[in-house]
Image (cartoon, rainbow, N blue to C red):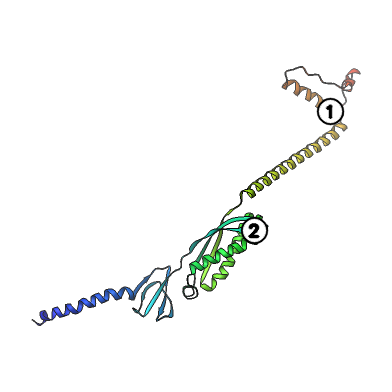
Amino acid sequence: MPLLEALPKLISWAIPLIILAVIILPQAIRILREYERGVIFRLGKLLGAKGPGLIFLIPIVDRMVRMDLRVVTINVERQEVMTRDNVPVTVDAVVYFRVVDPQAAVVKVENFLKATSLIAQTTLRSVLGQAPLDDLLSQRESINQKLQEIIDRQTEPWGVKVTAVEVKDVALPDTMKRAMAKQAEAERERRAKIVNAEGEFQAAEKMVQAAAMMSKEPIALQLRFLQTMREIASEHNTTTFLPVPIDLFGSYKKGEPPKS
């Protein structure tokens, strides 16, 4: 039968075609996820960025560079920085950024990850070196914002958007820690003395007001004196001698009650 006779020839032709298809198809078809883009080069010339979804390439002729558009986090290594007031500190930071222009990230910079990391390191030393120690410890948010703006301005031509920069830790020398602890303790003592002095001033002011009121009403002073004697008698079970002004009983000596 002619068909049976031609079958071996068909198989001999089909097998190389299948092998060729298995080799070529993975190079000709690419699938990109939602957060990925493919920068296509044809014979070395930039065609543009494609994706997401199914991408068809010409084998050998086309080359695709896969780019991830998600936010990337890099840690800036610990480094020593001299602040504006000549205090050595050790700082580290974390940088959050993402690729917004895949073509620029491939064409305009060799390795955007390494370049962004190095820019972050040099900017961290420069910005923190211009800030005094007090601002570095208390104005962390404004320093982070300044770092983000400077790094983002430098990476913008590469198609990289810096979304946030956070200074993680500021390590002080032991001598500086002890000096700051003494300063904080002295500040607490100063505040305590001020509060105590204010309390004494207010108490003295009230006593002056009470004395002025009693000077107008002598009977108030006598009643206060008797109340004090009563409190002493109830709290202390001992014999107490108190000097009693004779004027207190002047009205009783005359047989008249005290004037109110």
Q: Secondary structure at mark 2?
A: loop
Which quarter of the rendering shows the C terminus? top right
Mark nearer the viewer, 2 or 1: 2
Counting other residues with Cα less than 10 Å from the Cα at mark 1, is it few (<14), some (14-19), or many (20 or more)? some
Q: Is residue 174 above or below residue 71?
A: above
Residue toward you, 35 or 258:
35
Q: Nearer the viewer, residue 220 or 156?
A: 156
Q: Quadrant of residue 185?
A: top right
Judge from the rendering whether residue 117 lies leftward or rightward of residue 143; answer left or right.
Answer: left
Residue at the image position 31 percent from the left and 73 percent from the top: 26
Residue 197 percent across, percent down from the top left: 77, 40
Q: Nearer the viewer, residue 173 or 20?
A: 173
Q: Which residue: 82% across, 34% down?
A: 210
Q: Is residue 248 left or right of residue 80?
A: right
Left or right of 139: which side holds 18? left
In the image, what residue type sits under mark 2? Thr
Residue where numbered disc 2 is placed: 83
On screen, residue 62 versus residue 111, left or right, reads left
Q: Residue furthest right?
A: 254
Q: Position of residue 70 (x, y in %)?
A: 46, 65
The residue beneath circle 1 is 221
Amino acid type, mark 1 = Leu
Could you say where residue 204 lies in the image, as x and y percent from the top left? 80, 37
